[in-house]
Amino acid sequence: ITTLVAILLLIAQVISLVYLPFDGVELLLKIFLSSFCVMIILNELEWSGILRSSPLLWNWLPRGYMYAFIGLVSVEENNLKPSSGALNTLPIDYTAAVFIETASWMMFVMGILYISLSLCCCQLIQTKMRENYKERVAERKKIFEDGLTSLEFRQNDPTMT
């Protein structure tokens, strides 16, 4: 889900380049936010070894703070206030503004979710489940390499009674 939200936020940054007025500093913020979105996508898909070994991105608590911060920066950076309080006075297409705001708030919510799950020790549960899965895969590979008629396999498999 976080990967999808990061993709939506990346799209929102591109849309904001087209539909929103911006100056040099805002352009730099859009570039930084876009690069953070790419980094989030790579981190969530576990495609980059550099990102996987980073304690900032591996631990869910700092990851949640970073995601929430990116979402809030995107909300503030793309925040347009109508001059007279009416939505029809916005200088852009309202649909684009809603999409940008929604994607930004979704990233903030994902950050809060990571923080909450970290405080509930859910990362420990996930780590144990992954270790258990790796052990079971290694065991099955060994069984497959030794042959399916292995005595150990027949004794431990509940389907072979």
Image (cartoon, rainbow, N blue to C red):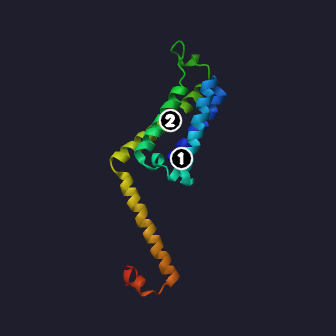
- Quickly name the residue at label 1: 3
Pick the residue in front: 12 or 88. Answer: 12
For image coordinates 53% across by 42% down, the residue present is 5
Quarter holding the C terminus is bottom left
Which label's residue is closer to the chain start, 2 or 1? 1
Question: Percent x, y for residue 131?
Answer: 42, 64
Farthest residue in the right direction? 18
In terms of image quadrants, where is residue 150? bottom left
Total marks placed: 2
Q: Is residue 22 left or right of residue 145?
A: right
Question: Percent x, y for residue 42?
Answer: 56, 49
For image coordinates 43% across by 71% down, the residue present is 136
- Quickly name the residue at label 2: 70
Question: Percent x, y for residue 77?
Answer: 54, 27
Pick the residue in front: 79 or 70. Answer: 70
In terms of image quadrants, where is residue 155? bottom left
